[in-house]
Image (cartoon, coloured by chain):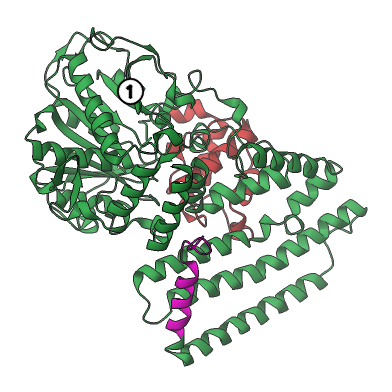
Chain colours: A green, B red
């Protein structure tokens, strides 16, 4: 199939890199000489290290093996370091290379550097050899079993978390609530109140449909929904269906109208409230921003009091490291793949996201699970990370093309959704926008661009952490984290904005609830769970989360 | 529980093989570790949980947190809270 040999155009990026160096052959020769010199120096260091007598003479065959593994590991690290330094400089210093190509080359070179790290190979990982000797080979045998399990049950993706430690509905996604609405696309969960009075205006959380919704309801200590409920808010959340081939026709517009808008309308009806606080995470944020543009066109924005975006891109001109994988050839290849299956399967998406941080999401677990023969650790966040979902064909191709490739929503009326051309300038609703400083998926400077695209007021908050930990960021007495918060209406330069603002210590969650409270009307007796029109169907977490 | 610096440094070397051989002291901060980011923090948290059976909150594992502070928390989480 065409474009499937190199769908990410890695070869193109490297060819451009090499061509760039050909423009300055002298600099290229100097770079090669520097590499040879560094390699020679490393080699001399290695020789001298290998000739040094061991601190303790190995007492048996096992100790001798470990000793040699230590030597091999030490030696290969010297060469690996030289190679990494040189490759990084080879990309950094390439003359006249576009920023986009440089970023792509960096991304793929980092994958090579991570893959070739000595710790990722048995004989150059002394701890793996030590365990092998200590367990008389059991560690590697167990590692082989772990690998076979992953091949059989996870499409060959290495397990990140101990699957036996968590059960959705028991120790994850366990905040009490009911599913009060279900259609072919989503279940809407309403959480049970935990305060005597609640704010009149409810919160509707629109979750990304690339993973399961319960990233906002992990274990009780870091459950975002539990925090919001305890602050006296009525909270609703979307739990999306994991689509199979039968839902290949589902479009981005369906997610917007049958998903987000439907959730808004159900929450308003159940709470007897004119308006809701609408919030979206990641692609859910992109979706609700599009919805706000659509509602503005319809003259129907009054159903939303305000909108909040958590780590969500609207302007995709700088899509971060995912940009290395976004290329017309890649989109063509994905289109061909989804045309065959009707869906983009979850493991493809999981692989793409893991590549963004391959040291922490691939190689560490390859070593732990396969070489050490260990069970992956207990971590609610990593368990959730492994629980991905499929994307339907129609939505997937539209999203990749219209947002990532063509960035249509940033141009007035260039994006057509639900029968309307979207112009974000017409959106006057106040926005609260959260970015995360270490976000690889939605770089915060990119999320900041939303501030100037909107026609209304914007408050921006920059959390210190990453795409997940920056958002799942509970208040805590021992927090060492900080965040920056301030008005950002119509601003474009995030760095300039940040320099003018003093950071606050701890979580940004209380800043958000204070911002919401002044827009929440009065405090009232909590509404019932569901209504006559939308009676409770089943207990949270519902059924779609298990698909 | 008494936690030695050597145990923590060993853990860091496990989570970040690149930092082997680098000078790490009790005053080193997590942000100085090569490739330190939020997923590295999750991995370091799981290492600490497995090794010491104490769940160090992610909020504590920030760029500016020193190894001394991590050890202080592991040794006595209650005292740290007050």
Q: Is residue A260 left or right of residue A340?
A: left
Q: Is residue A355 left or right of residue A494?
A: right
Q: Is residue A508 visible?
A: no
| Element assignment for label 1 | loop
- Identified at 35% across, 26% down, the residue is A184
Quarter of image, res A272 = top left
Across and down, in percent, residue B16 comes to 58, 52
The reply to whether the magenta stretch includes residue A380 is: no
Across and down, in percent, residue A533 comes to 23, 10
Q: Identify the residue under disc 1.
A: A183
Across and down, in percent, residue A56 comes to 86, 58
Residue extending farthest to the bottom is A26
Residue B58 vertical placement versus A172 (above, below): below
- Identified at 32% across, 54% down, the residue is A401
Q: Is residue A2 visible?
A: yes
Q: Which residues are magenta?
A: A1-21
């Amino acid at each position: 199939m065409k474009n499937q040999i190199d769908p990410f155009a890695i070869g193109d990026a490297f060819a451009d890199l090499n061509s760039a160096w050909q423009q300055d052959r002298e600099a290229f020769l100097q770079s090669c000489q520097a590499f040879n010199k560094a390699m020679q120096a490393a080699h001399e260091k290695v020789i001298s290290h290998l000739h040094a007598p061991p601190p303790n003479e190995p007492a048996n065959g096992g100790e001798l093996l470990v000793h040699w593994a230590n030597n091999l590991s030490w030696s290969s690290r010297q060469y690996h370091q030289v190679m990494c330094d040189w490759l990084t400089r080879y990309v950094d210093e390439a003359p006249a290379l576009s920023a986009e190509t440089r970023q792509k080359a960096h991304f793929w070179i980092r994958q090579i550097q991570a893959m070739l790290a000595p710790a990722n190979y048995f004989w150059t990982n002394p701890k793996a050899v030590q365990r092998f000797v200590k367990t008389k080979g059991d560690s590697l045998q167990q590692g082989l079993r772990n690998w076979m399990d992953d091949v059989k049950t996870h499409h060959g993706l290495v397990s990140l978390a101990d699957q036996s430690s968590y059960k959705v509905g028991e120790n994850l996604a366990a905040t009490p609530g009911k599913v009060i609405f279900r259609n072919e696309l989503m279940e809407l969960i309403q959480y049970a109140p935990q305060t005597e009075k609640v704010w009149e205006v409810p919160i509707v959380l629109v979750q990304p449909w690339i993973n399961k919704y319960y990233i906002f309801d992990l274990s009780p200590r870091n459950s975002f929904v539990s925090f919001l409920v305890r602050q006296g808010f009525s909270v609703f959340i979307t739990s999306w269906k994991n689509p199979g081939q039968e839902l290949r026709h589902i479009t981005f517009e369906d997610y917007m109208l049958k998903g987000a808008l439907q959730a808004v309308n159900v929450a308003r009806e159940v709470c007897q409230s004119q308006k809701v606080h609408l919030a979206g995470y990641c692609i859910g944020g992109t979706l609700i921003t599009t919805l706000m543009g659509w509602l503005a066109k319809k003259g129907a924005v009054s159903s939303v009091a305000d909108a909040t975006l958590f780590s969500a891109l609207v302007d995709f001109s700088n899509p971060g490291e995912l940009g290395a994988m976004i290329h017309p050839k890649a989109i063509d290849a994905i289109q061909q793949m989804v045309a065959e299956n009707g869906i983009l399967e979850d493991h493809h998406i999981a692989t793409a996201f893991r590549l963004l941080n391959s040291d922490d999401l691939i190689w560490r677990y390859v070593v732990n699970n396969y070489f050490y023969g260990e069970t992956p650790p207990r971590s609610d966040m990593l368990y959730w990370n492994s629980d991905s979902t499929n994307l339907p064909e129609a939505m997937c191709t539209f999203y990749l093309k219209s947002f990532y490739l063509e960035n249509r929503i940033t141009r007035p009326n260039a994006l057509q959704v639900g029968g309307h051309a979207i112009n974000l300038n017409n959106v006057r609703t106040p926005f609260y926008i959260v970015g995360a400083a270490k976000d690889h998926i939605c770089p915060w400077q990119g999320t900041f661009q939303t501030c100037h695209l909107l026609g209304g007021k914007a408050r921006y908050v920059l959390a210190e952490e990453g795409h997940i930990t920056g958002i799942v960021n509970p208040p805590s007495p021992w927090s060492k984290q900080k965040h920056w918060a301030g008005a950002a209406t119509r601003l474009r330069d995030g760095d300039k904005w940040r320099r003018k603002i003093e950071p606050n210590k701890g979580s940004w969650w209380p800043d958000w609830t204070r911002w919401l409270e002044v827009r929440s009307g009065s405090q009232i007796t909590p509404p019932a769970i569901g209504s006559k029109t939308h009676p409770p169907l089943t207990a949270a977490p519902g059924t779609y989360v298990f698909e | 529980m008494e936690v030695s610096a050597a145990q923590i440094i060993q853990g860091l070397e496990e989570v970040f093989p690149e930092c082997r051989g680098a000078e790490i002291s009790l005053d080193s901060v997590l942000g100085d570790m090569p490739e330190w980011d939020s997923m590295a923090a999750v991995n370091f948290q799981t290492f600490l949980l497995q090794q010491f059976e104490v769940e160090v909150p992610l909020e504590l594992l920030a760029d500016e947190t020193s190894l001394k502070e991590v050890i202080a928390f592991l040794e006595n989480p209650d005292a740290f809270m007050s």
